Amino acid sequence: MKIEKFIPLEFAANNYLLYDENIKSAVLIDCAGSNEEIFKFIEKNNLILEYILITHAHFDHCLGLKQFREKFPDVKILMAKADEELYKNLAYQCDLFGQRRVDPVGIDEFIDDTKKIKFLDNEIKVISTPGHSRGSVCYLIDDNLFSGDTLFFEEIGRCDLPTGSFKEIEQSIKEKLFKLDDKIKVFPGHGDNTNIGHEKINNAYFGKNAIF
């Protein structure tokens, strides 16, 4: 499995395309923009996009969904059930930040941490990590964790937006993510990659050397 990272100019929310060169299957984690760049990459490599997995329903992680639905009508879009109400209010979120409005498209399946998604010869495990939003989730495949806006390089996601909770993000990180193996690589929703072992020591909020 290969991982390609795309970073749109708007809000710099990371998109991750997981794919296999031989089987030609692909999964997109978050849909924040960079649409044409991702379209060209998929077409150049003759990939079949099976899923779009949303880590949480903030508008900057859903900006490209309409265009992707139009381009790939058979793709399945998955999102946490707990973020359904937040997703329905994408237009309000855009107004709140003074951005162009984004209309929601249909979600094919609302998920929680009982869900395992078949991809290639493995499974993508859903880990519910409320805190940044009520329905924030991380996706774990092999030793790769796609953490959305829950866990960043030496930082955490903000908790002051609707349905956010510092107490919940603390529980999510300490009781779920920090229980993972140190070698697990972390691909966050913004910024640079990290790993669980590094964050257990250096995370500014919950690491051994925390400063807050």
Image (tube, rainbow, N blue to C red):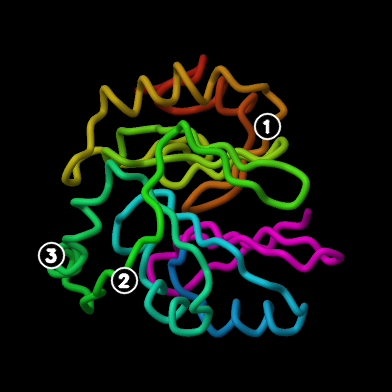
Instruction: State the image coordinates of residue 58 (x, y, percent, origin top left).
Output: 30, 56
Among numbered discs 2 and 1, the one appearing first in the sequence: 2
Q: Is residue 56 above or below residue 97?
A: above
Residue count near mark 2 (Cα–Cα under 10 Å), binned few <14, some 14–19, many ≥20: some
Tag 1 secondary structure: loop
**Amino acid found under the numbered disc labelled 3:** Tyr
Residue plotted at (51% across, 60% down): 14
Does 164 sit above or below residue 175?
below
Report the disc number at residue 105. 2
- SS for dot 3: helix
Residue 169 drawn at (x, y percent): 34, 28
Q: Amino acid at mark 1?
A: Ile
Residue named by callout 3: 92
Q: Residue at x 18, y 51 (%)?
A: 85
Q: Amino acid at mark 2?
A: Val
Marks 2, 3: nearer the viewer: 2
Q: Dot 1 corresponds to which residue?
A: 184
Circles 2 and 1: CB distance less than 8 Å?
Answer: no
* Camera-side residue of 181 and 158: 181
- Alpha-carbon distance for marks 1 and 3? 36 Å
Q: Earlier in the sequence, mark 2 or mark 3?
A: 3
The crowd level at tag 3 (other Cα within 10 Å; few <14, some 14-19, many 20+) is some
- Find residue 198 and report its image quarter: top right
Q: Are marks 2 and 3 in contact (CB under 8 Å)?
A: no
Quadrant in which the C terminus is drawn:
top left
- The stretch in magenta equals 1-30
Is 135 placed left or right of 98 in the picture? right
